[in-house]
């Protein structure tokens, strides 16, 4: 009979039960219970430090059906359920991406958590799906077009429903990538931009900014059923994809890098007023807040000229 030496499972650093994750940046092995506690503590700290949730808030969670937004909806439902002074709804935007975006999946996730889901679409609002925009303009700038139009629409929906906060599923990796992208582009104005709200723009909150992406994913697997695993078919064109790969390779040898970048971004955003703060206005055509030019209306004009 062959004798096999099995490698014993790693034990939780805090309680010696079997660990389900190893945090390279902290050196901790965590069991399921202590992992959930650790993640939720980080998210609560972010909310507390930024004073993101106040009595009387009506919070909309932007849910795409992916792991991050689904995990965020679960987390906020969990911590806000005991409170009667805060309301929670989900908002999903159908950009019009064939074989990718499935609004019914996000509605099922929200329904399973007992949260009302508001839906809107590019076709209903703009009369054109993202697939058609890409067909007309090419896919080199697809993420830029989608991002502008999606932010425009979700803000409009949030205002129409009287929401006071818009919760986004951005995690530590997302925030670190954004800071590094602004550094690589030499975009000092974005690095220094304060996150103060301005008229017409529903304030954004990001409870998972201190939580690594892989931990948000694990939290989703533990608590949410039916979330989507695939990436948008147009995401390969985004600068973020290159930055993500580069940052992950560097952070493997320097595990605290992403935390340092997020801290840097938060520190720089507080050192000076935004150079764009005086240029915000309301678009005379669509009525949404914008800079000197409403980029959403500009994109739609360009697309319609080619149609």
Image (cartoon, rainbow, N blue to C red):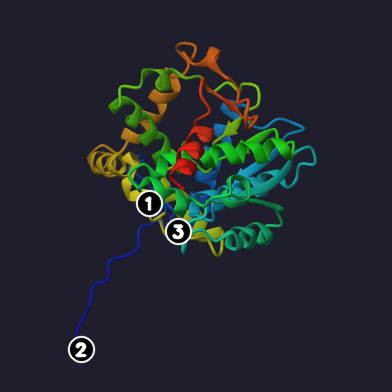
| Element type at mark 1 | loop
Q: Residue at x 58, y 62 (%)?
A: 105
Query: Which sits in the foreground, 187 or 156?
Result: 156
Check the image and report above or below for 150 versus 35.
above
> Crowding near pointer 1: few (<14 within 10 Å), some, many (20+)?
some
Q: Distance between the residues labelled 2 and 1?
A: 54 Å
Between the residue at mark 1 and the residue at mark 3, the CA separation in whole angstroms equals 42 Å
Does residue 13 appear in the picture of this structure?
no
Numbered label attached to residue 234: 1
Q: Tell us which disc is closer to us: 2 or 1.
A: 1
Comes first in the chain, label 2 or label 1: 2
Residue at x-position 49% and y-position 11%: 273
Residue 292 at x, y = what percent?
A: 51, 20
Residue annotated with mark 3: 17
Using the image, determine if residue 235 lies above or below residue 174.
below
Q: Mark 2 points at which residue?
A: 1
Distance between the alpha carbons at the discs numbered 2 and 3: 31 Å
Q: Which mark is residue 117?
A: none
């Amino acid at each position: 009979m062959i004798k096999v030496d099995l490698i014993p499972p790693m034990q939780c650093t805090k309680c010696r039960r079997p660990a389900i994750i190893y945090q390279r940046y902290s050196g901790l092995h965590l069991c399921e219970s202590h992992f959930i506690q650790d993640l939720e503590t980080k998210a609560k700290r972010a909310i507390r430090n930024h004073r993101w949730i106040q009595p009387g808030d009506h919070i909309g969670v932007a849910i795409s059906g992916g792991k991050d937004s689904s995990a965020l909806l679960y987390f906020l439902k969990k911590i806000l359920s005991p409170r009667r002074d805060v309301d929670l709804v989900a908002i999903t935007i159908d950009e019009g991406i064939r074989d990718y975006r499935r609004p019914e999946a996000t509605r099922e996730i929200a329904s399973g958590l007992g949260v009302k889901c508001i839906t809107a679409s590019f076709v209903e609002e703009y009369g054109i799906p993202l697939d058609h925009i890409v067909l007309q303009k090419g896919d080199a700038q697809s993420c830029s077009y989608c991002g502008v139009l999606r932010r425009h629409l979700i803000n409009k929906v949030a205002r129409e429903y009287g929401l006071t906060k818009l919760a986004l599923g951005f995690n530590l990796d997302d925030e670190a990538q954004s800071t590094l992208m602004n550094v690589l582009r030499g975009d000092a104005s974005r690095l220094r931009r304060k996150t103060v709200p301005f008229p017409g723009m529903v304030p954004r909150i990001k409870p998972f900014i201190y939580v690594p992406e892989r931990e948000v994913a694990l939290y989703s697997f533990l608590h949410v059923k039916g979330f989507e695993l695939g990436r948008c078919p147009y995401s390969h064109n985004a600068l973020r994809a290159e930055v993500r790969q580069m940052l992950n390779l560097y952070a493997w040898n320097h595990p605290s890098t992403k935390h340092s970048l997020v801290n840097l971004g938060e520190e720089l955003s507080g050192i000076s007023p935004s150079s764009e703060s005086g240029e915000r206005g309301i678009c005379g055509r669509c009525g949404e807040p914008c800079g000197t030019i409403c980029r959403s209306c500009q994109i739609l004009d360009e697309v319609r000229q080619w149609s």
